[in-house]
Image (cartoon, helix red, strand yellow):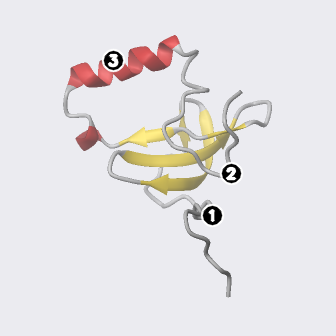
Amino acid sequence: MSERHPGAQPAPTALAADDPYEIGGYRLHARLGAGGTGVVYLAYTPGGRPIAPKAVRRAACPDRQVVQIAIDNIAAGGGGIHCATQSHPAVPPAA
């Protein structure tokens, strides 16, 4: 039996049947976690760097103006590649 340490993140899990195949052109490999606002996945850049794209639930963004502000912020950050909302041990922090 494996021992679970306090604060440890669960291991990535397989994609569910209703998960998207890709987000923003990045093929998804696994789920890293899920919460009230959406699901975080494991994907890789063409150079092999792991990234964690997040699919936000529609119910978490009922106000279109709030959604547009988030889209504008991601666009200003270079397309969102180094934009992160959650951390996971399988994905190193952006430099």
**Label 1, residues with CA under 10 Å away: few <14, some 14-19, many ≥20:** few
Of all residues shown, which one is farthest toward the top?
76
On the picture, is 71 further left or further right than 64? right
Instruction: Assign a secondary structure to mark 1.
Output: loop
With respect to residue 52, does 34 lie above or below? below
Identity, as a three-letter code, of the amino acid under mark 1: Ala
Q: Quadrant of the C terminus?
A: top right
| Residue drawn at x 58%, y 41% as measured from the top left | 52
Question: Residue tagged by mark 1?
Answer: 11
Residue 56 to residue 31: above or below: above
The reply to whether the C-beta atoms of the residues labelled 1 and 2 are less than 8 Å apart is yes
Quadrant for the N terminus, please.
Answer: bottom right
In the picture provided, is 22 more to the left or to the right than 91?
Answer: left
Residue contact between numbered discs 3 and 2, judged by CB atoms under 8 Å: no
Q: Which residue is mark 3?
A: 69
Q: Find the distance from the CA under tag 3 to the CA under tag 2.
A: 29 Å
Name the spot of residue 42 as percent of width and height, x first.
62, 47
Question: Which amino acid type is shown beneath numbered disc 3?
Answer: Ile
